[in-house]
Image (spheres, rainbow, N blue to C red):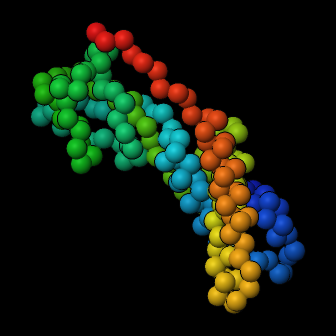
């Protein structure tokens, strides 16, 4: 799904479908959708894997979209935390080798591009729309307060709760790992 396909769905969710008298501009809605996609990425990052090219000094550039490092492996063997350090976008091995390095990590989601795929997985479009709608209604509430009219904060909060409920249902409980 593209940003230009998400925007009319957000307008429908907000009841802002009267051409020529839109409450929110396309640019404003695109910003809300971008913020919502980034927030989803923080709450449910993508699980990714990358192969890092061997480096004789033991320093490897980590992927730019890395949020949290899950594991590091070399030659098919997963390294323990004392066998590497990760800091400032660089991975350093305690004992550099010549094997390729494989990292598994939680990766950030980029803002949807102006054209092209927004990068949402199956089932993620509704919660992104809810988050964007919460932001849009929050923005509208502030505009109304400035004009002395009633706020739409309750509607914004309802959209936010809807997203949070969806998120709670998606998260997997932590599992205990037996001590070695």
Left or right for 160, reference 69: right
For this view, does 88 lie left or right of residue 2?
Answer: left
Residue 151, relative to residue 40: is it above or below?
below
Q: Which of 60 and 54 is in front in this view?
A: 60
- Quarter of the image where one finds residue 86: top left
Quadrant of image for the C terminus: top left
Which residue in the rendered view is the most extreme toward the bottom?
Answer: 147
Horizontal side of residue 88 vs 15, given as left or right? left
Q: Residue at x 70, y 89 (%)?
A: 148
148 in relation to 2, above or below: below
Residue 74 % position (x, y): 27, 20
In which quarter of the view is residue 33 placed?
A: bottom right
State the residue at coordinates (64%, 39%): 121
Does residue 86 show up?
yes
In the rendered view, tell whether residue 129 sits above or below residue 168: below
Q: Check the image and report above or below for 27 versus 132.
A: below
* Residue 128 in picture, x, y percent from top left: 66, 52
Residue at far right of view: 18
- Which residue occupies the foreground of this view, 48 or 166? 166
Inspect this view and state whether residue 29 appears.
no
Question: Could you tell me which residue is drawn at 65 percent across and 56 percent down?
Answer: 160
How many numbered discs, if any? 0
In the picture, measured across the screen, residue 134 lies left or right of residue 70, that is right
Q: Nearer the viewer, residue 93 or 174?
A: 174
Where residue 149 sits in the image (x, y, percent)? Answer: 74, 85
To which quarter of the image does residue 14 belong?
A: bottom right
Residue at the (76%, 77%) spot, across then down = 23
């Amino acid at each position: 799904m593209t940003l230009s396909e998400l925007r009319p769905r957000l307008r429908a969710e907000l009841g802002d479908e009267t051409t020529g008298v839109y409450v929110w501009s396309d640019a404003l809605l695109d910003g809300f959708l971008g913020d919502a996609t980034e927030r989803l990425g923080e709450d449910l990052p993508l699980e990714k894997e990358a192969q890092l090219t061997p480096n004789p000094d033991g320093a490897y550039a980590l992927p730019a979209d890395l949020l949290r490092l899950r594991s590091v492996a070399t030659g098919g063997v997963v390294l323990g935390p004392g066998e590497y350090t990760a800091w400032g976008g660089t991975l350093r091995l305690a004992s550099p080798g010549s094997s390729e390095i494989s990292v598994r990590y939680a990766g950030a989601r980029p803002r949807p591009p102006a054209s092209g795929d927004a990068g949402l997985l199956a089932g993620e479009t509704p919660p992104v729309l809810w988050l964007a709608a919460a932001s849009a209604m929050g923005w509208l509430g502030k505009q109304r307060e400035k004009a002395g009219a009633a706020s739409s904060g309750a509607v914004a909060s309802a959209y936010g709760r809807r997203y949070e409920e969806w998120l709670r249902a998606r998260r997997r409980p932590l599992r205990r790992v037996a001590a070695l």
